[in-house]
Image: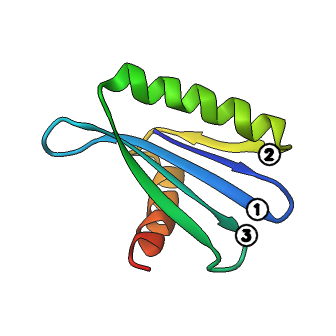
Amino acid sequence: MIIRWETDHDYVLVHIHQDMFGDWIFSRAWGQIGTQFGGLKHALADDHAQAMLWLEDETTIQSSRGFRKVLEADDSSPEAQEAMGQLSLLDAL
């Protein structure tokens, strides 16, 4: 699952997925749109429920900061694949 929020200048992207060991990973990328400024953080959740709780918290935080949700997609969708490409670029920095 990939969710992206934006303002006019900034973005936050969250990716929730299982790794090859069955662990749930909560990845969060943020930055300025159109630049390479930003960051990436990964967290290991105890289970899927905890990852979803973190997503609820993130949704509340971004809404309170004036971000609007612009993408919510399954990992296999074309939009999610494009977002994953952006996430991979940040991971290499």
Residue kind at label 1, given as amino acid type: Asp
Are dots 1 and 3 in contact, CB under 8 Å?
A: yes
SS for callout 1: strand
Residue 12 position in % (x across, y down): 65, 53
- Badge 1 is on which residue? 10
- Name the quarter where the N terminus is drawn: top left
Residue kind at label 2, given as amino acid type: Phe
Q: Residue 39 lies in what quarter of the image?
A: bottom right
SS for callout 2: loop
Q: Is residue 22 left or right of residue 41?
A: left
Q: Is residue 3 left or right of residue 15?
A: right
Residue kind at label 3, given as amino acid type: Ile
Label 2 – label 1 distance at C-alpha: 8 Å
Residue 49 position in % (x across, y down): 39, 19
Residue 90 position in % (x across, y down): 48, 72
Q: Earlier in the sequence, mark 2 or mark 3?
A: 3
Residue 67, labelled with which disc?
A: 2
- Name the quarter where the C terminus is drawn: bottom left
The crowding category of the residue bearing disc 2, from other C-alpha atoms within 10 Å (few below 14, some 14 to 19, many at least 20), is some
Residue 33, labelled with which disc?
A: 3
